[in-house]
Image: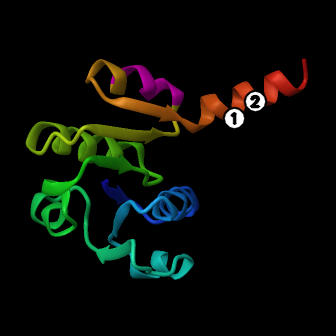
Amino acid sequence: MNIVIMGCNGIAVNVAEKMAKNDHKITIIDAQPDNFLIIEETENITTIIGDGTISNELEGAGIIESDIFLALEPSDNRNILAAQKVKSLYNPKTILCLVSDPKKDGIFRKLGLNVISTTSLISDIVLDSIR
């Protein structure tokens, strides 16, 4: 599968490295070159300096051929903007959007986006572990 990830951070790198081991082709796009210091390009992982909310930069990252788009930046607003754009213009099979603010979770879902709320997940794990 071809996977485009917006944002190069710990979560994105972990996902990319695991997916690359399964022979998936991963492209990570991030506007900050220093963010790429935490990952090594391999045969299956490519990094591109660019803004994942801009159509021509997404296209340069291979969004047209992608099966999956993951919006994994720390900014909820940038993630929703990119995910909505990708859904309406390119419509890969799977789009996943990272959300930190649980109040935005419902809004993103109403827009038809698949959401992972890090705050809700961690809160649930903490509560489960103290019961």
Q: Which residue is mark 1?
A: 122
Q: Which quarter shows the C terminus?
A: top right
Q: Residue at x 43, y 28 (%)?
A: 104
Q: Residue at x 58, y 38 (%)?
A: 118
Q: Which residue is mark 2?
A: 125
x, y percentage for residue 130? 90, 24
Front in this rendered view, residue 37 or 61: 61
Colour scheme: rainbow
Q: Residues within 10 Å of mark 1 (few under 14, many from 20)?
A: few
The answer to whether 52 is drawn above or below residue 44 in the figure is above
106 drawn magenta:
yes
x, y percentage for residue 10? 58, 62
Are dots 2 and 1 in contact, CB under 8 Å? Answer: yes
Q: Residues in magenta?
A: 102-107
Left or right: 56 in relation to 41 = left
Front in this rendered view, residue 116 or 25: 25
x, y percentage for residue 81? 25, 44
Q: Amino acid at mark 2?
A: Ile
**Mark 1, secondary structure of its residue:** helix
Q: Tell me where residue 94 sits by quadrant.
A: top left
